[in-house]
Amino acid sequence: IMNWEETAQLVEVATGPVEDAIGTDITVELPEGDAVNGEALAVSIGCAACHIQAPTGPAWLADAGQAGIGERAAQRIAAPDYTGNAQTAEQYMLESIVMPAVYMVPNYQDLMPNNYGDTLAKQDVADLIAYMLTLK
């Protein structure tokens, strides 16, 4: 890591409550999301590290065996083993961000931070969801 110091990018991650935090109500009305900003946010706060670059979390991108998260979210809420409360793909994604332990995708551990309801603003979450919906 020391060898990368000069080329490393500084990533600032919110660690405390933010104004207009999303909270944990998955029925909250979100502002219109910006997928481009959502992609940048996914990289800057670390989502991409586990969900795109490494198999730590359920993959967001499509591969030979499954669709991307943009299509898979609707399939998850219809699955018989789904334990969450979401009624739409968007609610499922919101639920997964702010209350990740409500439903655990089989074969994955509960490693997701559980404070995003306090540390992400509504617009940030709307942008992340807009980006995830593009991943078919």
Image (tube, rainbow, N blue to C red):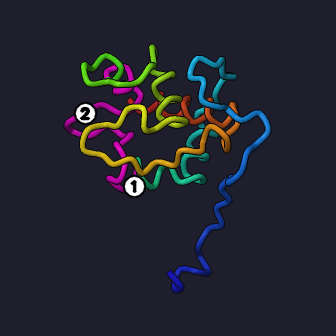
Q: Picture coordinates of residue 39 (x, y %)?
A: 56, 42
Circle 2: residue type: Gln
Q: Quadrant of residue 127?
A: top right
Q: Is residue 82 above or below residue 135?
A: above
116 vs 64, left or right, is right
Q: Picture coordinates of residue 17 (x, y %)?
A: 73, 45
Q: Quadrant of residue 104?
A: top left
Point 48% across, 29% down: residue:
93
Which one is in front, 83 or 40?
83
Residues at circles 2 and 1 in contact by the CB criterion of under 8 Å: no
Residue at the farthest left position: 65
Answer whether residue 104 is magenta in the image.
no
What residue did someone put label 1 on? 53
Q: Is residue 14 above or below residue 25?
A: below
Magenta-tinted stretch = 52-75
100 vs 36, left or right, is left
Q: Picture coordinates of residue 60 (x, y %)?
A: 39, 40
Point 27% across, 20% down: residue:
79
What residue did someone put label 2 on? 66
Q: Which one is earlier in the sequence, the residue at label 2 or at label 1? A: 1
Q: Main secondary structure of the magenta part?
A: loop
Point 53% across, 85% down: residue:
2
